Image (cartoon, rainbow, N blue to C red):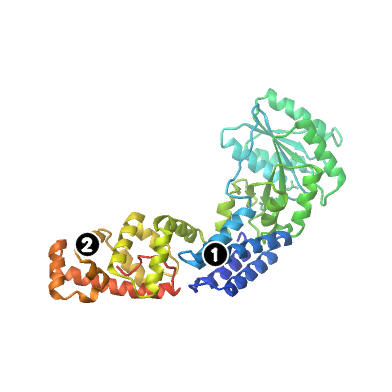
Amino acid sequence: AMFGNLSDRLVEALSNLRSKGRLTAADIDGTVREIRRALLEADVALPVVKEFAAHVRERALGDEVNRALNPAQQVVKIVNDELVRILGGEESRSLTFAKRPPTVIMLVGLQGAGKTTLAGKLSKWLAGQKHSPMLVAADLQRPNAVTQLQIVAEQAGVPVFAPEPGNGVGDPVQVARDAMRIATEKLHDVVIIDTAGRLGVDEELMRQARMIKEATNPDEVLFTIDSMIGQDAVATAQAFNEGVGFSGVVLTKLDGDARGGAALSVAQTTGKPILFASTGERLDDFEVFHPDRMASRILNMGDVLSLIEQAQKAFDEEEARKTAEKIASDQFTLEDFLVQMQQIRKAGNFKKMIGMLPGMDRNMKDQLENFDESSLVHIEAIIQSMTPLERKNPKVLNGSRRARIARGSGTEVKDVNELIKRFEASAKMMKTMARGAMPGIPGMGPM
Ligand code: GDP
């Protein structure tokens, strides 16, 4: 699968942390070491790996982890943030269209990178968005390149501009120029130029690409790179960036068991965004590249990440930290329990949120299924009918006090008894969680 091995390794490195409550510097160093090894084995370029590891380490040792609801989860979030960063950052950019059509998109890259296939994919995708693309066969080097482009164009249902057969080798620069005129005449609003690639980077290839670029003044030059080329990715990308110059990157063959190195190195080392990913031989195996989605795919932790965000939004961090301290020192009272109930209600979709927690056991899931959120209202009423002393120290709750509370809250004594039992069980469980047995989301007692 896409990034399969890398993904497994990262998830493993991070899940080792998840069994721990507090993280020591040694825990973090161990994890960073594993992450580093995983990235190197996935062929990510060394400078990128070094910087990645340094950032993760620095942030993981810092305050944001210390103060987090759950330190291990916070480290997951940091690794995710850093993955997003090296894949190009939060903002994913799409194609730039010309103010005055036609928009010109030029494809460059080594032979076999997947340019011709990409031309078909891109044109089909654009045609699906009410554009009227035209493909241009400016790869006159490789035998069959023109025919191959004609085949994908037919599959995509878009026209191709190609030199007349029998005119010798032809001049790709002239073909590109003629294509621009034809596109304007025929009202095509996007022109996609497929250029020649070589098996390796060479000056003649670069010169020709530069001339086509000068002749057509493209809005986008997309550097197409085979994700499987591993450690060569960075040097190839740099050669094209210096030799031709490009505005964006397309990763191809992400469907193979690519180790992912190219993907994780190229954006960072060239400073150019990855715009699309090609994930198979069929024209539909094509997607807009989103760094954030790709990162959570790699970490395989989309659910956990959105949980962390939701939990952070729902629970005041300062409150949560105080609660954790109280739980740890056995000072957790019904007063705190009430505050938590109110926070849970504020959080809204409570069941769904808790359901996303990894490590929920069967029994807890069942309890959750049977949990009626409206019972929170009763719980609140009961606690509100207690005196401050009773809330602080439920041990004083004898029979007559319980009867009074039941009357005051419009419930029955058995409801009061039930709540106190739950509270005690909850406090006990949260104590276990505070020691790191499970992600410590407050308020998560058995209901
Ligand atoms: P070009 O020389 O850069 O034009 O590369 P081609 O478009 O001819 O692609 C080279 C080979 O890679 C062809 O056999 C394609 O079918 C294949 N290919 C292209 N893109 C992908 C992809 O995303 N996944 C897979 N598995 N194969 C691809």
Residue depicted at 16% across the width and 76% down the height: 398
Q: Secondary structure at mark 2?
A: helix
Question: In the rendering, at what x and y percent does residue 185 appear?
Answer: 69, 23
Question: In the rendering, at what x and y percent does residue 367 appear?
Answer: 31, 68
Mark in front: 1 vs 2: 2
Q: Disc 1 residue type?
A: Val
Q: In the picture provided, is 339 more to the left or to the right than 439?
A: left
How packed is label 1: few (under 14 Cα within 10 Å), some, or many (20 or more)?
A: many
Examine the rendering and report whether any part of residue 22 can be seen. Answer: yes
Q: Disc 2 residue type?
A: Gln
- In terms of depth relative to the viewer, which is nearer, 382 or 415? 382
Task: Give the residue at mark 2.
Answer: 384
Q: In the picture provided, is 446 more to the left or to the right than 397?
A: right
Q: CA distance from mark 1 to mark 2?
A: 38 Å
Using the rendered view, name the quadrant where residue 41 is placed. bottom right
Task: Give the residue at mark 1.
Answer: 75
